[in-house]
Image (tube, helix red, strand yellow):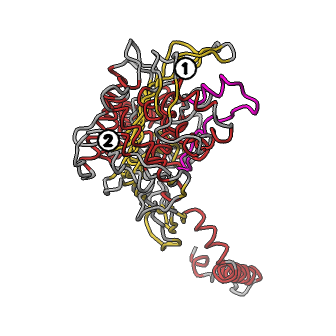
Amino acid sequence: MKKTRNRKLKSVPMCTWRYYTMIVLVCVCFVSLVGRAAYLQVINSGDLAKAGESRSVRIKGISSHRGLILDRNGVELARSVPIESVWLDPKTLLADKEVLNSKAWKGFAAALNRDEDELKQWVLQRAGKRFVWLERHLDPNIALYVKRLAINGVNLKSEYRRYYPSAEVAAHLVGFTGIDDKGLEGVEKAFDAYLTGKQGKEKVVVDLQRRVVEERGVLKEAEQGHDLQLSIDSRIQAVAYKELKKAVLSHSAKGGSIVVVDVDTGEVLAMASQPSFNPNRSDSRFPAMTRNRAIADLFEPGSTVKPLTIVSALESGKYQPESKVDTSPGRMRLNRKVVKDPRNYGVLDLGGIIKKSSNMGVSRVALSLSDQEFLDSFQKVGFGKITGLGVQGEAKGVMRPRANWSDIEKATFSFGYGFQVSSIQLAQAYSILGAEGVKRPLTLLKQSGLEQGEQVIKPRIAKNVVKMMENVVAAGGTGTKAKVDGYRVAGKTGTARKVAKTGGYGDEYVTVFAGLVPASDPKFAIVVMVDEPAGDAYYGGTVSAPVFSKVADKALDLMNVAPDANGAKTLALGGIRHD
């Protein structure tokens, strides 16, 4: 035992091949790691940085405001307001298997007024997606509630929604935008490119929940949309809308339209239609409600174009204001059709024809003129052509007389049958008469000065016809209800049967009053059209003329137009000047 304990243990040699092999392997690994690190950090650093940024760096849009729409006095007709929309990241949302059965999810579905099971299935069908819209333009209170729920994968995005302070009053004119803030109707669509700004861009770093954790700088500044100032006076617009709506409802009419034009500038001061809609509510935007009847609806203008027949007669040189026309016996047969007056008016001068609205009188005048002489004034005032307002949906009218038309066709044409116009076209025609024969382009934009225009009717002829139209509103005329206290009014009533679907004319009517005020120096051209009034009161003088009176009275007051020295007293025709 002692010998065993005293025996020396053999020592293990240190420099064996295993040792050196291990040293070599360690060195090779170390050099490889250093080389790999050098390769990744020096040679391949750009690719790695790019790969890393692709997972966390995003290009984020910088919102731009859509421009304001203002009336001529700076009153807002449309503006953009900030609002929240909710979107989902289904992949992140479904990472937690229990989230769709949680109390928070139940509250989320209830807040959006969605069925919980249907919403769950909707999300599961989009399981692999990273971005889907769920609800646009949330109520602010609901958006705040959703934010407080803090469900991972449910996100809010700030957007802008269009708001229209005047609601129904200017709905057809201003129009509205869609969910993505693009103009769909009216001025919003016509001037969409001008109103719309350009989004900017910025680079940001986001976390796993796509929340911005770092801003890397602006790549492109946002360009805000331009403000647009219209020619509309919101005060006159409100009165026009109110009075038109009252007339349509009181007469149980199908609809109607009204246009107010500044004679001196061609600016449209008011344009309203009935029925209307609230542009702030998408659920009220039915096609029948959103159609701008003032520019889109065509109708046969009836007797409102008789003054233009008289203009053609005076322009031809064959007639003078005091020229006499025998309307006896109050009826005549043309091509087996009958043209007649309510009674035999006997011999009338041109002013008397307009005052009595004699179909016999204008028919005999028209038949005495060549086709070109007769149609001259109708063409010059722009019938059959769009006015150029620039708003989509404007109809150009129907103005296609046949080359070899019959006497009855020419006669009925002279008192407003056989062709169709819109309210805006008729307003333009009357504004030309009020501007002493000068045709100025109509516009929805506020003008800085007087538009020169084009002389299409001789000044004295235009003045003479306007004076003739004053007798329509005088005692014994057909438009006495269009009177405005303190001002002289010139105008013309029109009542036209509507074409039936089965052909010919039915029992429905379009009633119109078109006029100028004050007649002494016309400031406004106003056209009121009411479509299919019910009951026995279906004449332009009883349905449309009162609307003209109320709107004109308020417009004159708002625009500070001085009353006439002799009030509403009608001038004698003896004062009419001759060419």
Residue 211, label in figure: none
Residue 4, given in percent of the width and then of the height, sits at 61, 76
Mark on residue 498? Answer: 1
Q: Nearer the viewer, residue 34 or 290?
A: 290
Nearer to me, 409 or 52:
409
In the picture provided, is 574 more to the left or to the right than 194? left
Q: Is residue 172 above or below residue 249?
A: below
Residue at left offset 68%, top offset 86%: 14
Q: Main secondary structure of the magenta part?
A: loop
Q: Nearer the viewer, residue 77 or 36?
A: 77
Q: Is residue 177 visible?
A: yes
Q: Amino acid at mark 2?
A: Leu
> Helix or strand or loop: what does disc 2 sit on?
loop
| Viewport quadrant of the N terminus | bottom right
Count of labels in the image: 2
| As drawn, 303 above or below 321 | above
Residue bearing the label numbered 2: 571
Tell me where the magenta segment starts and ends, as one range: 387-414
Q: Reply yes or no: does residue 402 show up in magenta.
A: yes
Position of 473 compared to 425: left or right?
Answer: left
